Amino acid sequence: MNGTIPAPTIEYGMLAPMLVVFGAAIVGVLVEAFAPRYLRSAIHLPITLLSLLISFVLIVWQWVEGVPTKAAAMGAIAVDGPAMFIWGTILVLAFVSVLLIKDEGHFVGAAAAVPGSAEEEQALYEGAAHTEVYPLVLFAVGGMMLFPAANDLLIAFVGLEVMSLPLYLLCGLARRRRLLSQEAAMKYFLLGAFSSAFFLYGTAMIYGYANSLDLAEIGASLGVVGGQDMLLYIGGAMIGVGLLFKIGAAPFQAWKPDVYQGAPTPITALMASGTLIAAFGALLRVFWVALGGLDWNWRPVFYGVAILTMLGGAIFAITQTDIKRMLAYSSIAHGGFLLIGVIATGSAPAQNTSALSGILFYLVAYGFTTVGAFAVVTMVRDAGGEAWHLSRWAGLGKRSPLLAGVFAFFLLAFAGIPLTSGFFGKYAVFQAAVTGGALPLVIVGAVASAVAAFFYVRVIVLMFFSDPAADGPSVVLPSRGTAAVVGLAALATVVLGVFPQPVLDLAHSAAQSLFVR
Amino acid sequence: MPWLSTLMGVSVLGALGVTLIRNDKLAKQFTLLVSLIVLALTVTMAVQFSPNGDQWQFQENHSWIPAFGVNYSLAVDGIALVLILLSVILVPIVVLASWHDAEKGKRSVRTYFSLILVLEAMMIGVFAATDVFLFYVFFEAMLIPMYFMIGSYGGPQRAYASVKFLLYSLFGGLLMLVAVIALYSIAGKNTFMLSDLIGTIQDVNTQKWLFLGFFVAFAIKAPLWPFHTWLPDAAAQAPAGAAVLLVGVLDKVGTFGMMRFCLQLFPDAAAYFTPLVIVLAVIGVIYGAIVAIGQTDMMRLIAYTSVSHFGLITLGVFAMTKGNPGAQDAGTGATLYMVNHGFSTGALFLIVGFLIYRRGSKFIPDYGGVQKVAPILAGTFLVAGLSSLSLPGLSTFVSEFMVLAGAYRLHVPATVIATMGVILAAIYILWMYQRTMNGPTAESVKTLPDLNAREKWVVAPLVALLLVFGFYPKPLLDVINPAVKDTLSSVSVTADQAAAAPGVKEGK
């Protein structure tokens, strides 16, 4: 130590896509502070959408220019092929989710007012609105981008928190069924904070072992440092708990149904697609780059977790009577299928590439279908708001054949029927796993898919083969934004189901370079 | 000219076109027209098929998903050709027969007819696919239109029946998916082309596992005892037209798949499992027949007769194993049986459907003496029934005899027991006929009208086909025989052994 700290080099160009999003979020905060109330929403929306668009364009530009092969910002953030692919996917899905968010009526007027109180009445009367939603979403999206790109455990923690904190808040902002929404926010916050603490404690342990927070250096230290294995194992396990919590893998899945149900549906769409993608990116990076040498230890655990997650998600979903809870359990089951892909990573680069590209493709396919499905949920309403109870969906196919048809199509995609995107996603992951020698896991996956098909099909039966309830919910005429979201999601599900090759190529070339070490 | 793609394309475009037509009557006529165009095109194609030419004709091959080594690859051999012919002949008949079926349904008429055309495209695709992955795609995707046809337009238990149908098939399909992936990855040839994959799996133990993955899917589909329980429910709840396509064509994909994939890709495993499969098949023959005798619901009765018939077809398919001198006969017989069974059971389902439509009941005790009020209905019913019990002179006799003759060379006791099924068939068919058509005319059927012109047009072609191929099966046999021979060469039965078998090649 000679008293001077060298200035860090920051590759602003490489980080630009993320900086744009964060910058726009801060501008959004300023808008909240200075713009008059009636103008805010009109200012927020273009800023939000534009920043997401610019960020996406920057990624495409950088992709064309050539994917960087070295981590940026002194090795703290890795802008590599997989990270850029994940960024692009998150941005597109966030853009689509914002189109849902912009619809009036999803968010509470005054979150601080006690539900049912005079203040709430007053706020409703005044037409108060929480326009902070937009900057919060941008912060969350920025966090989702930082988390999977973090090449340093501490930065990953920062990303995790930046992603999670706005989401905790957003979960509590539902306009209807406010107590449920607040409960969801509280649960998510408490459990999320708990899991973050696990992650942080694990980080400290690993630092104690490797004397570094850099993923690559941790990876290099495996097997070199002697006598401290306990620190490494405990630390690795704790980091694993933190990451698996965000994915919603069993046995850390309990928050998902409650949170998905209570959160405003557009936020659920954002979480179900974006958070899952970001968390899988981070999980892969940490366990491959930093703890790849330790795979003899974590692979069996992941085996068990994957089996538990797939079967648990699929079996518990059968008993659900609420559409949002059912989709939440379905998301748990899909997390399990994706974990098969994580286990399929092996030592040979070709095997890694095929597993990674399979996961990336799966994430794109699943993300689009999920956003589309939740967009449909926002449209089926009765007097009390969105009609969540499955019995209310009976006979929907009779009253709104088009919407019910599209939703049935999404469900078939979740079930992995050929000629939908879900089939190829599942296929890509399964194939990588079979080649990687995880055949038993794939058989369990096939059985879980069959179980899962049951509850997807049950909804179709309700919608098409049951008589409509007399006072059944009505389908609101979708706003242009919602219609666009549903249309885009349906289009993506068809196109990826019939001509998956271009996206497979893209995922393959993203995975080609693997994560930078 | 890409014949097979054209056929599928016309069907799909027709299906899209139907959904745009607002007038229900016009939609039906349009569907009929499209299905007749497809039939005409298929016949034109079939005429150009040279039985003694290449094994695979009308080949099309395009790369579909290079990342997975998947090709859009179509071609037909004689076996696939006759099954495609069966499908495209049944479709216009079903369309005509279902003229009023959909009106009782909950959803629109045009959706029903659109689903039929979508299904037609997939039926052509599933038989014509020469890429294992493409076959799998059609195999699974074709469940969906059938699922909606049963679920939206079926009887009171339709939701239960359709879900059971879908889940059974899907479960089998997913096991097959694992086997398909494992096949691809073990073969390591980066292709799913059937012709490239044949002979690549040498290890017998591997073959056995992969065989089971494929076989269970096909056994559920076919359906083979004890995987059959979904069929009576599905067939009884489905509208008659859908039941014809389900039992007549969709289930054939199971036995077709056994012949094309199980036998050719895993010949050693097939030989190993042959005794087991034959036992299951024979149990199915007897069990299906006995349970059919006990049914009072006519739709369920016919469904159980099919379980019995599928037992015989499976017996024929698995008599094609190594070292059976009757393999050629058994294979040809099984293929012919698939076609004849489609026509014969199709006719039974449709005529019973007409009967049920008139009286509003599926139960045998509600009928009696229909013969006197509706002689044409009763007469055609009898012909269809007799074909189901394989009366000489009707086409099913030829195929059943060939199967039994071929299987006899492999396994005498099993064949003898299976032959008992023919006797039981006489009981279930004639007893059903006796209880519904003969005897004093029941009060409730006194005013039953006979077949109208539309219904006659439905039944006439089927009866004609049953008679023509009963007396003159040669055209079909000429097409099927070389294809079975080629299949057998993949199963590595020597040509000498196959040719040495005497048989009923010229029919009766």
Image: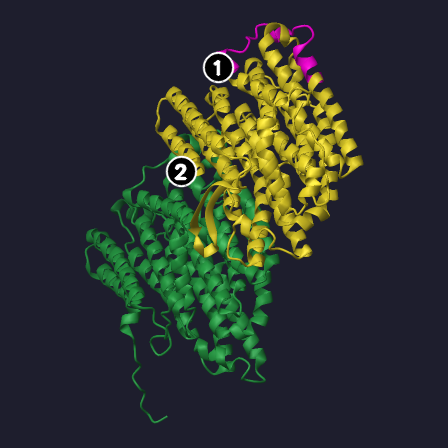
Chain colours: A green, B yellow
Residue A162 located within the stretch drawn in magenta: no
Residue B185 image position (x, y, % from top left): 56, 58
Identify the residue position indicated by label 2 in the image. B1
Q: Chain of mark 1?
A: B
Percent from the top left, x then y, of residue A301? 59, 65
Sequence-earlier tag: 1 or 2: 2
- What is the chain letter for disc 2? B
Q: Which residue is mark 1?
A: B454
Viewed as shown, does residue A133 lie left or right of B187? left
Q: Is residue A172 visible?
A: no
Magenta region: which residues?
B431-456
Q: Is residue B451 magenta?
A: yes
Q: Badge 2: how crowded within 10 Å, few (<14), some, or many (20+)?
A: few
Between marks 1 and 2 in the image, the one whose residue lies nearer the viewer = 2
Q: CA distance from mark 1 to mark 2?
A: 35 Å
Identity of the amino acid at label 1?
A: Arg
- Front position in the image: A482 or A118: A482
Q: Quadrant of residue B165?
A: top right
Please, is residue A308 above or below residue A115 in the view? below
Going by the numbered disc 2, the residue's amino acid type is: Met
Is residue B86 shown to the viewer in this render?
Answer: yes
Which quadrant of the rendered structure holds the N terminus of chain B?
top left
The image shows a total of numbered marks equal to 2
In the rendered image, the quadrant that contains the C terminus of chain B is top right
